[in-house]
């Protein structure tokens, strides 16, 4: 497993988006613009920390999770990967930072990841996922279940 650069300067309330595909700058510009749009009922100002460094190109889920493990305020990481850049929806990959070691036991971990440790989410849903996971209002498994029920396996909204 390769070592990736440290993620520094992320505000604890900022969504972390890691770009792992650098083949389509136009798609990336679309994704970043969509993520910076005001969101929610407020509407709320978007706070996003982008990792847009070619050193992260092709990084695997495990490599990224290993690189961000020290961030205790991080419940989920969003990947702008090849699928994100190519899909019409530009759905990002949401990956929980939860590890088996953080759970009471294996049964607890299995329950919390029953729909997997990742799912796709449209840019408009990223802030909702991040905010609710950060404050413990909803669990990762609840969003993953919603995505699981979608025909394209994408979380869009509750």
Image (tube, rainbow, N blue to C red):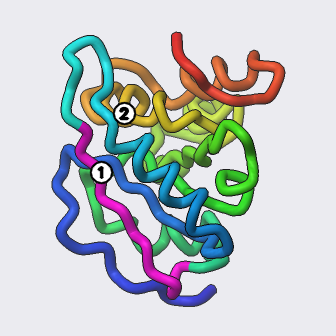
Quick check: 134 left or right of 53? left
Q: Residue at x 63, y 32 (%)?
A: 107
Q: Is residue 113 above or below residue 52?
A: above
Coordinates of residue 149 in the picture (x, y in percent)? 75, 16
Determine which quarter of the picture holds residue 16.
bottom left
The answer to whether residue 127 is visible is: yes
Marker disc for residue 48: 1
Residue 135 x %, y %: 25, 28
Residue at 18% over, 69% down: 9
Give x and y (percent) for residue 85: 67, 56
Q: Does the magenta portion include 54?
A: yes
Cβ atoms under marks 2 and 1 closer than 8 Å: no
- Number of numbered tags placed on the structure image: 2
- Range shown magenta: 46-56
Q: Nearer the viewer, residue 136 or 128?
A: 128
> Which image quarter holds the N terminus?
bottom right
Task: Give the image quarter of residue 41.
Answer: top left
Residue 95 is covered by the magenta coloring: no
Name the residue rendered at 52%, 66% in the picture: 19
Residue, disc 2: 127
Q: In what element is the residue under mark 2?
A: helix
């Amino acid at each position: 497993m390769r070592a990736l650069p440290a993620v520094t300067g992320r505000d604890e309330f900022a969504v972390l988006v890691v770009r792992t595909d650098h083949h389509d700058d136009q798609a990336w510009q679309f994704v970043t613009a969509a993520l910076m749009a005001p969101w929610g009922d407020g509407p709320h100002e978007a706070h996003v920390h982008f990792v847009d460094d070619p050193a992260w190109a092709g990084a695997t889920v495990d490599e990224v999770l290993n690189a961000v493990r020290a961030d205790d305020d991080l419940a989920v990481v969003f990947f702008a990967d090849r699928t994100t850049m190519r899909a019409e929806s530009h759905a990002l990959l949401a990956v929980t930072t939860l590890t088996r070691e953080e759970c009471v036991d294996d049964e607890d971990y299995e329950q919390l990841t029953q729909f997997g440790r990742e799912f796709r989410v449209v840019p408009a849903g990223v802030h909702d996922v991040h905010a609710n996971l950060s404050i413990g209002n909803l669990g990762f498994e609840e969003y993953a279940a919603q995505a699981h029920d979608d025909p394209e396996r994408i979380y869009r909204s509750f």
